[in-house]
Image (cartoon, rainbow, N blue to C red):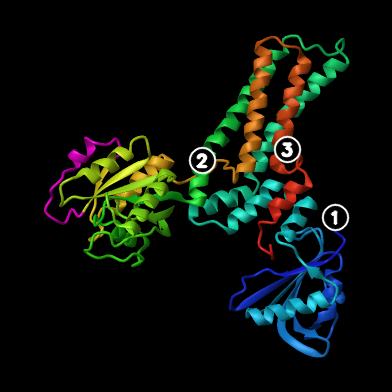
Amino acid sequence: MRSTDTIAAIASGMTASGIGIIRISGPEAFAVSERICRLKNGKKLSEMKPNSVHYGFISSGKEEVDEALILLMRAPHTYTAEDTVEIDCHGGPCAMRKVLECALENGARMAEPGEFTKRAFLNGRIDLSEAEAVMDLIGAKNEAALKSSEANLRGSVRTEVTEIRGMLLRNLARIEASLDDPEQLSLEGYGKELRADLEKADDRIVKMLKNYDGGKLAREGIRTVILGKPNTGKSTLLNLLTGEDRAIVTDIAGTTRDALEETVNLSGITLAVTDTAGIRKTNEPIEKIGVEKARRYAENADLILYVADSSVPLDENDREILKFLGGRKAIALLNKTDLEPAVSPEEIESRTEAPVLSISAKEGTGLDELTGKIKEMFFGGKLAFDGETILVNERQKEALSDAHESIGQTLKSIADGMPEDLWSIDLTDAYASLGKILGEEVGDDVINEIFSKFCMGK
């Protein structure tokens, strides 16, 4: 499945910067580069040693486009496991496009999205779980997500899955060998030994599946909706969380009519926060639409932050919201504690199972307590995933769940005293499901879909 053509793309961002990178990879990478590069020392690129850096100029015919550093890297010791040249030119979008055009006019073709990483996978440089970790690393929104994706890029998923597959394969080989020659290799009493192996493997699989939800929230953010009746300080809370005046704040009830969405990094926790219209009974058409929209957002949220005004007694609107919180992950925030209190935390606690915190969004107090409570609710009080294997997407989770189901079926067959050839069928299914995580048991359509989500230069 090795590619025979040479590809090129801009590998750095298309914004003004000090340096721009054009990456060329494939069997003709050195030849293409030699056609467009003139080294300062007058020598040819083909005369230079691999894994070296050279200063020169990029030209299109007789026209000099830019000065650059040219990095030469020989296969297989490159990202794609192919001959690779990286041209470090000036970082202006126009300059980078001109250098890329030179490469395309001299034998390279434009790389498809994710094609460099796809070639690294197809050439055996990385497995599919590590390729997916590359995209996860690029999109990391916080330190926890960064650490998780770095661990996966170093092979934490591959190592765990490979070890489990190795155990399955050893047992499959023993079963098949015995079925082929039962006189030489008996399986009498083997069910107990196999069950012990499978229970250990399944424990590791279950642990990875449990870690998935926490890892997903750490990577993608907790979908958080700020809910409350009008003028309780919801928009002030959003501004406090973002550290900017993102929402309009006035003393006029009902100022927020539509949902306002922001991404917030709260001490390592990413919150995808939506500030909504105040919930109250109203006949005003536009405000009514905002209230209905707020309810829809809240129904799909991972976390609801209910904001109540501590200086105003609870009313029918508050009681309706507190009833809505039942059975949902929520935190009740008793806001405006800098004013004379008219409602106590105990009064709210008597009406909801949600934890109650006292804050002043205006004064900026109570934020540490809120952060600690979110960590406790979603991450057991900690964000670190050190030493734990975290799956990065639903595809991996589904494959692992299938393996868990097949192992469970094997354990049931052993307990029911079923024939050994049935054990082999389910173990083979488990082995194949785990192979999908590494890319050994997936079709071209799945591979193409995965890499189509990458950026062009990666």
Is residue 315 found left or right of 153 in the rendered image?
Answer: left
Residue 282: x and y, percent?
27, 52
Answer with the quarter of the image where residue 116 lies. Answer: bottom right
**Disc 1: which residue:** 2
The magenta region covers: 336-355
With respect to residue 315, does 91 lie above or below? below
Query: How many other residues sit within 10 Å of disc 3, few (<14), some (14-19) or many (≥20)?
Result: many
Please name whichever residue, 175 or 280, is drawn nearer the observer in this view of the structure.
280
Q: CA distance from mark 2 to mark 1?
A: 36 Å
Q: Residue at x 42, y 46 (%)?
A: 301
- Residue type (three-letter) at the residue carrying disc 2: Asp
Q: Quadrant of the C terminus?
A: bottom right
Q: How many marks?
A: 3
Q: Residue at x 24, y 45 (%)?
A: 318
Who comes first in sequence, dot 2 or dot 3? 2
Query: How many other residues sit within 10 Å of disc 2, few (<14), some (14-19) or many (≥20)?
Result: some
- Residue type (three-letter) at the residue carrying disc 3: Gly
Give the residue furthest to the bottom: 62
Residue 317: x and y, percent?
24, 46
The circle on residue 435 is 3
Q: Is any part of residue 182 visible from this angle?
A: yes
Is residue 229 found left or right of 217 in the rendered image?
Answer: left
Residue 351 on the magenta span: yes
**Disc 2: which residue:** 213
Q: For the residue labelled by badge 3, is the local secondary structure a helix, a strand or a loop? A: helix
Helix, strand or loop: magenta stretch: loop
Answer with the quarter of the image where residue 156 lies. Answer: top right
Q: CA distance from mark 2 to mark 3?
A: 22 Å
Residue 408: x and y, percent?
63, 22
